[in-house]
Amino acid sequence: MQNESSLRIAIQKGGRLSEKTLSLLENIGLEFDNYKNRILVPCRNYDVELLLIRDDDIPEYVQDGICELGFVGHNVTAESRADVTHLRALGFGKCRLAVAAPKNSPIKSIKDLDGSRIATSYPVLTREHFEKQGLHIKTIEISGAVEIAPTLDVADAIADIVSTGGTLKTNGLVEVETILESEAELIQTNQPIPADKQELIQKFLMRMGARQQAEKSRYIMMNAPSDAVEEICRIIPSLKSPTVLPLAENDLVAIHSVIPTQQFWEVMEELKAAGASGIVILPIENMIV
Ligand code: PRT
Ligand code: ZN
């Protein structure tokens, strides 16, 4: 039995997004026991329970209010046309829904596909994409191994999820056009939510925000001659002005700051050139700005 006041969150059971979703939940302090082989998993230290289901079912469960929140690929939500609210993009599960055709075929642009057959597991998004451009196609709905359809002459081209592009290459296919860019997202029901659950959602989102902010940043510490501080402050793209502490050794200072994760390698070279030494870069667990 579900505790009436528990927030219910749908996540994918045993798929590409499962591990990252569970580690995201654990990183914001939620502890779950023994989620293997279970569908409903209670949380030990937060008033929440997880519903582990196939990703295709998540948008509908959230739409119908069976779960207040869901973690799912944007491609799945968009294809489902479910009436839900997008809350956050999560930065993992990045991929795209793309049209691809056999390398040796005369199909070079989307216009060359007018009147053709397209194999896909995403018929709604695919049809809409072609219709918008005034092109007529026939979608052949296939639930797996879509990339083999042109070889079997089941279709002239495909519309499928692409990540590295390796699968297309192996099957002699080349991308013609992107239909949709996607990543994992957090969605919320549009059904009425009681006040106590709203409050749980707000707290949950605050924790997620703090974690996402922390992941975007690194804590950097270094020593430098005091006359290099000005140059170092120019180089560090810090969120706040750096802390500068005098050291016992003559004319040396310690500089501490927070920098965007993606910049830390380039910055490190510049800092060394400016006279910094003993540079230490640390991950940040949580960050409330
Ligand atoms: O069983 P269930 O229905 O829950 O899972 P599923 O088999 O439908 O989905 P799953 O677990 O494969 O993927 C879940 C989600 O991960 C997708 O809905 C996307 O949002 C996201 N994602 C990210 C991907 C990929 N990358 C991906 N590469 N989903 C599928 N692929 C497949 C793609 O279909 C193709 O077969 O990987 C192949 C292409 O990969 P590359 O790297 O060779 O281009
Ligand atoms: Zn699925």
Image: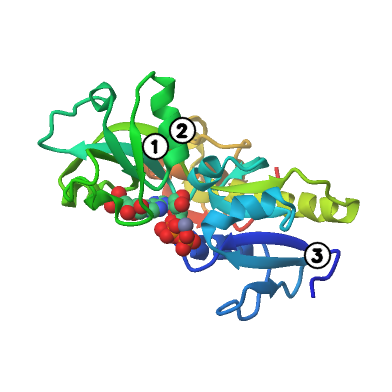
**Earlier sequence position, callout 1 versus callout 2:** 2
Query: Residue beneath label 3, please?
Result: 6
Q: Amino acid at mark 2?
A: Ile
Query: Residue beneath label 2, please?
Result: 235
How are the colours assigned in the image?
Answer: rainbow
- Indicate the quadrant where residue 22 lies: bottom right
- Marks 3/1 in contact by CB < 8 Å: the verdict is no
**Earlier sequence position, callout 3 versus callout 2:** 3
Return the x and y of residue 35 as percentages of the image width and height: 60, 76
Q: Is residue 44 above or below residue 249?
A: below
Return the x and y of residue 29 as percentages of the image width and height: 68, 65
Query: Residue beneath label 1, please?
Result: 274
How far is mark 1 from mark 2, CA to CA?
9 Å
Return the x and y of residue 11 as percentages of the image width and height: 59, 61
Name the disc covering residue 177, or none: none
Left or right: 227 in relation to 244 = left
